[in-house]
Image: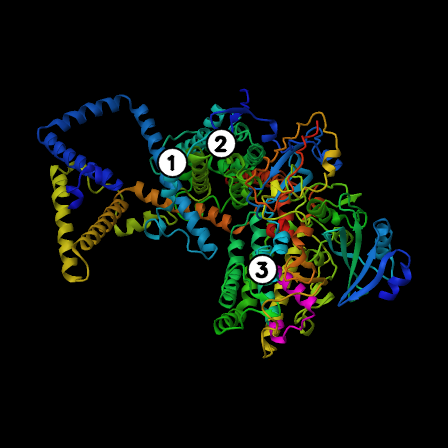
Amino acid sequence: MSVITRPFQRMTLAGKIIVPLLILGAVLTVLLLVAWEIGLIPWLIDIVADVVTSNIDIVRFIIAATAILLFTVPTAFVIIFMELKVIAFLASRIGPNRTGPWGILASTVAGFKVLAKEDYTPTGADAPVFTVAPIVTYLAAVLTLLVIPFAPGLVGYDMNIGLLYFFAVSGLSVVGLMMGGWASFNKYSLLGGLRAAAQIVSYELPLVLAPVGVIMLAGTLSLNGIVEHQSGWFWNWYVFQQPLAFIVFFIAATAEGNRTPFDLTEADSEIVAGFATEYSGMRFGFFFFAEYVGVFVLSALTTVLFFGGWNSPIDPRPILDFFNVSIGQTMNLANLDIWLLWALVIGVPLIIAAATFVIYTFNSSWGIIKSAVVAFILFNVFAISAVAIWAFISFEVVVGLFWFLLKAFTFAFVFVWMRGTLPRVRIDQLMGFAWKWLIEISLLNAFVTAGAILVVQQVTGS
Amino acid sequence: MKRRLEQVFADQFAAPVRQINDQTEIWVNAKDLPAVMTRLHDDEQFEFEILADLCGVDTGTEMWSVYHLWSPRSPDWLRVIVPSLKRDDPRVPSVTFIWPGAEWPEREAYDMFGIIYEGNRDLRRIYMPPDYTSFPLRKDFLLPDDASRSPGEGVRHVEQTHQPAENMRQPQIRMAPQLGDNQISTLSQLPEETEAPPA
Amino acid sequence: MTEVKTEVRSLDDPNIWVDTPATIYDAIPPYPPRTEREAEFYHLRDGEMLLNLGPQHPSTHGVLRVVLKIDGERVVDLDPVLGYLHRGVEKLCEVGDWHIAISQCDPLEYVASLFSEAMPVMAAEKLLDLQVPKRAQYIRTLVWELNRIASHGLFIGWLALDLGGLTPLLYGFIERDEIVEMLASLTGQRMLFNYLRIGGVNRDLNHDFLSRLGDWMSRAAVELEQETRLLNENEIFIRRTKGMGVMTPEMALRMRVTGPNLRAAGIPYDIRRAHPYAAYPDMEFDIPTRAEGDSYARYMLRVDEIRESIKIIDQCLHEMPDGPIMARIPRLIRIPPGRAFVAVESPRGEYACYAMSDGSDQPFRLRISDPSFWNLQSVGELVPGNLIADTMAVMASLDPVMGGVDK
């Protein structure tokens, strides 16, 4: 209680943030209840619905862009944390274990640290270009997410040339890297930027040529269409029809995302940090984020092209039919009345208090505060699990999202795994590998696929 | 080994061959050094193909340049001493024509003692900064002082004999401030003049 | 293209803006060339540029600065600039007595400091013509070989790190950490041991050390296999190191390279055999050599040397004699006048010392010859013609320690 009675000036920083938020939350709750009771909310909802329905395209785009921008941040944090932990595991270390349980907040805290750092422009740098470069790189990585189908119906914009759009936009990242490398007025940056240009331009070719077989099989450039072609059991996935294309594509994606063993653009033991040498603060953070968003995007694209996207590996329909279960919405939130809100406001504290009492009674060594904290955490765990299970069996979107994220993060893990295992290749080996092997293999794959399709069409007569 | 050395180089040694523990010691004048070293390296009965060490020594009155060699034909180290180099202008022929790897040690000896190895292609300071003017390992370099204000300024070294190239910037040699009266009394040899950088 | 700002704040007074010379951004020195070689190096032909590597750089193993003259990614020439870690150890040895010189020489080779601290000790013993007790000789041999393994373990990690592999560094550190902890229980220090004394060693073997050592020895060979397998069979690692920085035997002798780098070129020069000291005449071990002389040979040779070291440690432990660990000499000792040259085989090569005594209790001249210093200068022969990335790989495979290079 001393927290509340203490004057505002003498509070700790956490208190200065939390106490106003608590007061604000209480006031807003009261206002919301009052507004609901006098019928203000439905009136407002009507107006908003009118506006939304008349401008549905714009609203949809804004929501999709916002959601994707917001989505990139936790994704990047998760992949960074995964990288810290997995590489630590590979190297027989513990890894981050200070901030949060198992150190799960390590990458988040690092992100805030980057925000708080000094952001300077070196003397002699081309300041406008220097500032814009990380944004270009970051946006190039983020905008590609717009066409990735996360789940049935959950796609930012379902273009019929989605794959083409993807390669076009992801190719823009090299512009940002070159801008950063050139504008930094530093020779390491320049070398890094030029290496990035050479590398990404070279690996763009196999990256685009490898999925040509997939495109021919699916008959569409729309990523949604490609995923729908792979529905059913897991042997419908294109990785089993196009294994060579998958290998070429994954290697090229590693190079495209500047990941070890192809991370020559930021080879820290050679050219310090490449294009990012002179960057600090959040501008460096954008480069850093762009890399990890790029990892996720490339993992997602691998999943979509070769591993069935949001399709589950087993075909659920026969099983569901057997048990007479149908996936679909079983509970409509809109049907619930004001009682849901009251239940949340009154019921939740009651349940937590009851759990606290039980824990306090049966665990004599714990104080009331500790019991309350444990009860709160337990309640949250149960509540989240219950909601997740309900959502999983109710919505096809959630099932699709689950499988999609599982596959995508598996590939992100593979990227991290490779980083922990392999040394870096040299620039001439890198370029030679792209031009002497990958392009030829992907071209060969395209020809063989085309021939096979022709033969099958001749035989089946369709 | 001692006998063989005496036979071959009878007239080129400045002092008799000595045997100390596991080291054979020969004294060679500076002008005979290249011939002796070439013979020691190439002759089949010596085959001193590994240069174990190269260093300078300041005995307080004169400079030495000391080489240690190893050969599979002998169980001992061979020490070659080039004695009696003048303190104000020590000059020794370089051995980099046999061992190019002797370049850095010779630079080090030049840096620390001011011994000029004639024939070394890159005889410049290796440890101390380029605007440094004294030779730290000489015996008249007194340690308690700040190194940059030492009274032990020895030979004005070879760096200043070069004419600056026209496209190069002039050297920005930071001159040490003159020592004040509050300096400790043992360091009475104040530098007479502080030379301006070469024009 | 915007105009390049050339004014920066003065370091002395931040209110003053001074015109910066282009040399701030370029590695061209602001003074006239001192030698023809320097003039030739800093004269840039068409298409060439200078890249300043270090002294603050992730992979120069300390504070080495190398100016690379590059044409695109290809290194045309390079000029190592030393002295950023110069402490004047030789001068400091001359003003203290012989015992102080031990701890002055300790941090020279800070990765394997038992070798550098042996220099004044062995030189003084040779000047005194002192017979060190047999047990002390065996203990010295034992700790030297342990330190050699620790140093080579770190080398493997460094090489992999400079090639971009993150994990082998930590694998190398696992072994090194165990050995260093072991030596800490014997000497009291993890890094700069200060263990050897004129006439013997500081402390006798204790139970903690021996139990840790026995524990480690029982699995050392197996762990070595496990930890080097990640690199030995790695295609990228082999392609990055095989055929890189090839050193022919003639060149190795001319450049006066010693230690594993020389043996990797095929010349079996090892002071433990060429000029035996301590307990090495009693030991049975091989001198591994390799004929290729490239980075991969230098790496594999060190892995082989770790195996030989384990053999030597085993023999030391089995044949460890009883007896005193210090010769009977007075604590305040005057070394008789004379000249002495001693050399030991350190993990990097021939660690040699030339000592002159004038009969006082201080060394008259204590010249330390560090193998890193001699080995490092061969990068000038090995690197030109290769790519920037190989500069690091070749430099790491020579395994320099800047504490010893700069003295």
How many residues crowd around disc 2 within 10 Å: few (fewer than 14), some, or many (20 or more)? Answer: many
Q: Is residue B21 left or right of residue C12?
A: right
Disc marking residue C100: 3
Task: Evaluate if marks 3 and 2 touch, with contact meaning CB atoms under 8 Å apart.
Answer: no
Q: Earlier in the sequence, mark 2 or mark 1?
A: 1
Which SS class for mark 2?
helix
Q: Nearer the viewer, residue B23 or B45?
A: B23
Kindly indicate the quadrant of the structure image that contains residue C109: bottom right
On the image, numbered disc 2 is attached to which residue? A173
Q: Position of residue B31 (x, y in %)?
A: 86, 48
Q: Chain of mark 1?
A: A
Kindly indicate the quadrant of the structure image that contains residue A34: top left
The magenta segment = C111-138
Viewer-side label of 2, 1: 1
Query: Residue at horizontal 88%, vertical 55%?
Result: B12
A297 relative to C114, above or below: above
Q: Position of residue A398 (x, y in %)?
A: 30, 43
A250 relative to A196, above or below: below
User: Which secondary structure dominates the residues rendered in magenta?
Assistant: helix
Q: Is residue A274 left or right of residue B165?
A: left
The answer to if C133 sits in the magenta stretch is: yes
Structural distance between the alpha carbons of marks 1 and 3: 50 Å
The answer to whether dots 3 and 2 both sit on one chain is: no
Q: Is residue A222 visible?
A: no
On the image, numbered disc 1 is attached to which residue? A115
Q: Is residue A262 visible?
A: yes
Structural distance between the alpha carbons of marks 2 and 1: 22 Å
Task: Evaluate if marks 1 and 3 touch, with contact meaning CB atoms under 8 Å apart.
Answer: no
Q: Position of residue C8 (x, y in %)?
A: 52, 26
A81 relative to A17, above or below: below
Which SS class for mark 3?
helix
**Mark 1 residue type:** Leu
